[in-house]
Amino acid sequence: MKKIIGLLIISFFLISHSYAETRFEKDLRILSKYNFFVDNEGNPYELDQNIDKDKTIILIYSHGSGGKERVLQLCKNSWYQIPPTVYQLDGVKIKNFTIKTYQLCKGARGFSQKDADLFWGTYDKNNQDINSVLDLKDENGVSLINKWKGSIQEKVIKLKIDEFKEKGFNNIVLSGHSAGGWDSLVLKSNFPSEIDGVIAFHPARSGKFAKTKKPHRGWVNWRNYKISMIKVEKLENVLVFSHEKDKYENPKTSKFLSNSNNVRFIDVSDTKCKSKLTTGGWHGITLTKCFADKDPKRKEIIKYLEEIF
């Protein structure tokens, strides 16, 4: 009897272990609690199951980064939640289409400490040459660059796009602030046929780069790599908002976007709205209620959507 019980326990352990969640899967499950459609007053709602999918535009919003590689970003505070500039579009008619705005909480974790030590240690030993780390793999043969937080969070967005596509929604527009806007541009340039457009609010993925007078060589090389991930020549139907006082990226540091004929670049430096600490100062001026309600350049979003649909 004891042997039988022992075998059952071992069998149970093996079965349970085989179905154990990966860290990424666990993160997705936790973050899913903060994913939902949001109406034009900022309230979450369930999508009507009988909705005409062919005449629906799913506008997916993704937030900026908290900057911490090993911390799960839960969308509990306003910084991570869909802003008025986006959710006020819910229910708006664009020709024969109706917009449905969706908040995506994408804050999955990136490098473990072991991954980070190997990645950045190798980077520094090789004079901050980005090519020295692109082929690095962990003990399971997984590319470390694909475990970086930026790559992981792009994966979260892509999985959500795939999910909507599988449900029959084929009109997908990405919107996002800061890292969320940057990730959206990366995905649009790599999967142009799957994403109809992008509305990027102050896209950035390199910390306070615009504010720094003498950035470190390693920082510049890493930023240049992240810029290379956005294949600007393959971008189309892209709308970008930027402000000259943004300490992360501004119109000058974003010339790789503003100088492109593939990008509609909107400089909002002349806005009459005041920056707020809760939305990141000038880095998040387009996220404020003031911008959504009063700034005339908010209307560029509707014009843009009318052109691409």
Image: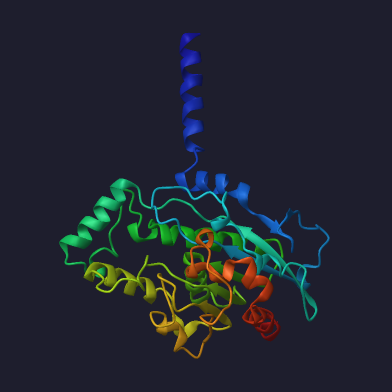
Q: Give the image quarter of residue 163.
A: bottom right
Work out whether 141 lies above or below 126. above
Specify how the rendered protein is coloured.
Answer: rainbow
Seen at 80% across and 79% down, the residue is: 96
Seen at 56% across and 55% down, the residue is: 105
Considering every residue shown, the one lying at the far right of the view is: 50
Q: Is residue 130 left or right of residue 86?
A: left
Residue 270, image x and y in percent? 54, 82
Residue 223, image x and y in percent? 33, 71
Q: Is residue 102 left or right of residue 126?
A: right
Residue 132, image x and y in percent? 23, 66
Total marks in image:
0
Considering every residue shown, the one lying at the far bottom of the view is: 261
Work out whether 59 lies above or below 136. below
Seen at 42% across and 80% down, the residue is: 254
For the C terminus, which image quadrant?
A: bottom right
Q: Nearer the viewer, residue 17 or 37?
A: 37
Q: Nearer the viewer, residue 5 or 76?
A: 76
Seen at 50% across and 54% down, the residue is: 107
Work out whether 23 lies above or below 188. above
Q: Is residue 215 left or right of residue 268?
A: left
Q: Give the image quarter of residue 150.
A: bottom left
Residue 88, image x and y in percent? 71, 67
